[in-house]
Amino acid sequence: MNDKFKDLHKMADEIKSHGMRPGLWTRPLIARKDDSKTLLSPKIPGRGQDDELILDPTIPENITRIKRNIALYKQWGYHMVKHDYSTWDIFGKWGVQMKDTFTAPGWKFHDQTKTNAEIMNHLYGAIREAAGDIYIIGCNTASHLSEGVFELNRIGDDTSGKEWARTKKMGVKALGFRLPQNIPFMRPMAIA
């Protein structure tokens, strides 16, 4: 809670009183400034935003916190949760920057026994499990790992109602690159 949002449960009820479905945006891996350094991901060299404190998703205590937060949103009465920044927080790069590497060479999580995909699957699965019947929107997530886990996956960067060039670059191209995947993801797999 803070001065702008004093009672989020009351806010959800008020939104529902207007016939709307309340939703929240969350960044599950962002740490608080008072968090123990033992919970944080090692700093990623060249990240560009070195003041950000990121929880290490390979530490079980952090996954427990994320699940508790998502369950709290449900308890407050929210019907939708958009979680954001997971690939940025995990790898320290935006998708467009991941040309030949996902992250800085030599950088590692505390737990080095899992692959990046296993780490992300565990995080996404924890969010899904805690959410129950809440509608989950993944943003800045790995779309192939989000498939079947979240009801919706945002596939492109921000667009603009004022800058057509940005809308064309970020919105139209995102749809164009996603279109070939729609039918295979929607069609049940044939068993040979």
Image (cartoon, rainbow, N blue to C red):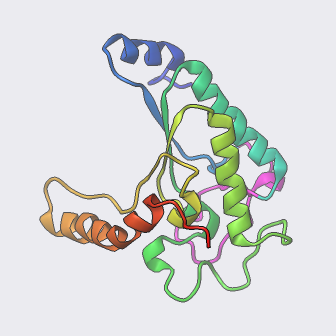
Residue at position x 62%, y 20% in the image: 75
Residue at position x 79%, y 59% in the image: 58
Residue at position x 58%, y 85% in the image: 101
Q: Nearer the viewer, residue 13 or 179?
A: 179
Q: Nearer the viewer, residue 93 or 138?
A: 138
Q: Nearer the viewer, residue 4 or 80?
A: 80
Quadrant of the snapshot with the C terminus: bottom right
Residue at position x 48%, y 59% in the image: 140
Q: Is residue 71 left or right of residue 16?
A: right
What range is drawn magenta here? 34-57
Residue 104 falls in image quadrant = bottom right
| Magenta residue check for 56 | yes
Q: Where is residue 169 shown, x and y percent of the image?
A: 24, 71
Q: Where is residue 119 shown, x and y percent of the image?
A: 72, 63
Q: Where is residue 68 shown, x and y percent of the image?
A: 71, 33
| Magenta residue check for 84 | no
Residue 70: tell me if it is visible.
yes
Q: Where is residue 20 shown, x and y percent of the image?
A: 34, 21
Quadrant of the snapshot with the N terminus: top right
Q: Is residue 156 left or right of residue 153?
A: left
Q: Is residue 2 left or right of residue 29?
A: left
